[in-house]
């Protein structure tokens, strides 16, 4: 594993720098003792504020560029303040990502697309200029001591992006142009090719097949089938995808990830970089609004994480919005909307964590960079194996030195479940076992574990439980 994270869209720039609300949000997101302990932060490279085609002022972002090659690195100050605080709390990985080229490099002078037949809103022959801009931003952050581990030049290239937020579509030929130019611009600055991430596909099936709807929308150009179309231009690739829409228990959850695993090259690092629930779920009945703040939303998240990690083989996993103000299940923590007539949240506004935050903590606090996923069998007390994604799922990781084993169980059932912690070849070995639980009443709370390795343990109903075993060599 490399990291667990979230992004700084769209509300983080609305948190006043160094204010109580910003500090509280940062603590909940990044502190390994008092919060989720996220190790990755996806930082949006803004394309420029504009209200012509984007009504919500939070969904367009200040751009660092003033003119070609001239930058104001003090721009986007609130988001940079949160980034600095995250680094103070131990943030290890920053992913820079772009939703749209800067306005000067778009066909329509906006930061989203028109309803025309252009394959992309990037101005013709502007791939090199866009790449230079991205590489300049990356170089600045690296030189400022920010732990930049990846740069993603495009985001969900198969969607039309006609309004509502920054966004730019790219046909496959456009993607290859931009990715190739970005790779060359990074190399010219001494930044490694391993930093380049693509394509942040907005659809899992589009990783192995063409998107027919996108083809029809833009003159028949090819969009999708990224696993086959892109590796030739990225080399030792960091391949990224989003899990939206592939979360139905009866159809897409397992099938889509099993299919993705079949087309993954051994040379790839596979990252899942965005997800939030796009539809209501019966499991969210314990919540009083569309934010799904309770364990229903938490269990849905943990099931998706399990599928991406254990079936697809992703080695980094990120939620969508770290901070939200919307009445939607898109945030880990929530703040009120900006003060009327401004684009800033009140500096002393309350911060409300969701159960999703604490489910992320069950993974992120304990599975740190360098851990390796290992096979696990979810054994019940009678020695049987369960593989019911409606009930108990388990995923396990071992530390780089081989001495610490982390096992994360998700019990989505309404009844308690018993499971046996058994490490093959270590029967009777004394190890230290610690346990943390998130359920309806507990938020990544430590629990006393009694009994040796091989003991049968009870997983509370509707819970996520993490066991940490030390001394397992």
Image (cartoon, grey):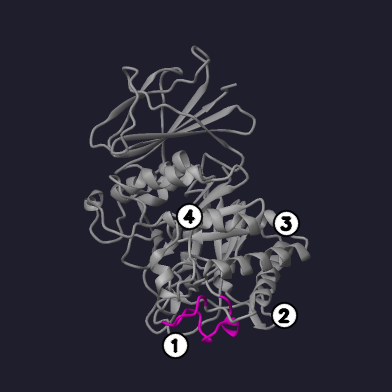
Camera-nearest label, 3 or 2: 3
The magenta stretch is 101-120
Q: On the image, which quarter does residue 362 sit in?
A: top left
Q: Give the secondary structure at mark 1.
A: loop
> Which residue is under mark 1?
52
Mark 1 touches mark 2? (CB < 8 Å) = no
- Magenta residues: mostly which secondary structure? loop
Closest to the observer, 12 or 7: 7
Q: Position of residue 56 (x, y in %)?
A: 40, 79
Q: Earlier in the sequence, mark 3 or mark 4?
A: 3
Q: Residues within 10 Å of mark 3 (few under 14, many from 20)?
A: some
Camera-nearest label, 2 or 4: 4
Mark 3 touches mark 2? (CB < 8 Å) = no
Whether residue 302 is situated above or below residue 198 in the rendered picture:
above
Q: Identify which residue is drawn at 49% across, 55% down.
A: 241
Camera-nearest label, 3 or 4: 4
Camera-nearest label, 4 or 1: 4
Mark 3 touches mark 4? (CB < 8 Å) = no
The answer, for residue 148, to whether it is visible in the render is no
Q: Give the secondary structure at mark 3.
A: loop
Mark 2 touches mark 4? (CB < 8 Å) = no
Camera-nearest label, 1 or 3: 3
């Amino acid at each position: 594993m490399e990291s667990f994270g979230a992004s700084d869209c769209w509300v983080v720039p609305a948190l006043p720098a160094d204010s109580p609300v910003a500090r509280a949000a940062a603590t909940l997101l990044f502190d390994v003792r008092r919060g989720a302990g996220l190790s990755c932060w996806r930082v949006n490279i803004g394309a420029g504020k504009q209200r012509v085609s984007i009504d919500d002022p939070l969904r367009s972002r200040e751009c660092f560029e003033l003119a070609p090659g001239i930058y104001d690195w003090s721009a986007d100050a609130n988001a940079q303040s949160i980034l600095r605080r995250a680094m103070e709390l131990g943030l290890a990985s920053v992913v820079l990502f772009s939703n749209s080229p800067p306005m000067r490099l778009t066909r329509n002078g906006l930061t989203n697309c028109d309803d025309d037949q252009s394959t992309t809103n990037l101005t013709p022959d502007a791939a090199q200029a866009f790449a230079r801009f991205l590489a300049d931003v990356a170089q600045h952050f690296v030189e400022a001591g920010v732990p930049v581990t990846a740069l993603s030049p495009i985001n969900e290239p198969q969607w039309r992006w006609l309004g509502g937020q920054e966004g730019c579509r790219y046909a496959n030929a456009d993607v290859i142009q931009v990715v190739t130019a970005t790779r060359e611009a990074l190399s010219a600055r001494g930044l490694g090719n391993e930093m380049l991430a693509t394509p942040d596909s907005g659809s899992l099936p589009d990783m192995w097949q063409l998107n027919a709807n996108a083809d029809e929308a833009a003159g028949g150009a090819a969009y999708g089938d990224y696993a086959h179309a892109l590796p030739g231009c990225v080399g030792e690739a960091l391949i990224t995808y989003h899990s939206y829409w592939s979360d139905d228990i009866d159809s897409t959850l397992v099938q889509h990830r099993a299919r993705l695993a079949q087309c993954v090259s051994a040379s790839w690092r596979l990252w899942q970089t965005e997800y939030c629930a796009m539809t209501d779920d019966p499991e969210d009945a314990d919540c009083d609004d569309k934010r799904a703040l309770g364990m229903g939303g938490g269990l849905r998240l943990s099931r998706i994480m399990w599928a991406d990690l254990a079936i697809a083989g992703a080695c980094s996993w990120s939620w969508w919005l770290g901070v939200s103000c919307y009445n939607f299940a898109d945030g880990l923590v929530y703040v009120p909307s900006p003060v009327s007539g401004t684009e800033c949240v009140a500096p002393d506004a309350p911060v409300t964590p969701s159960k999703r935050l604490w489910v992320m903590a069950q993974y992120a606090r304990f599975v740190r960079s360098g851990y390796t996923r290992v096979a696990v069998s979810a054994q019940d007390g009678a020695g049987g194996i369960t593989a019911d994604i409606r009930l108990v799922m388990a995923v396990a990781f071992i530390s780089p030195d081989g001495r610490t084993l982390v096992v994360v169980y998700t019990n989505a059932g309404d009844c308690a479940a018993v499971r046996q912690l058994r490490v093959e070849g270590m029967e009777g070995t004394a190890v230290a076992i610690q346990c943390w639980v998130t359920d309806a009443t507990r938020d990544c709370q430590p629990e006393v574990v009694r009994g040796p390795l091989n003991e049968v343990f009870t997983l509370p109903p509707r819970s996520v439980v993490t066991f940490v075993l030390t001394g397992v060599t």
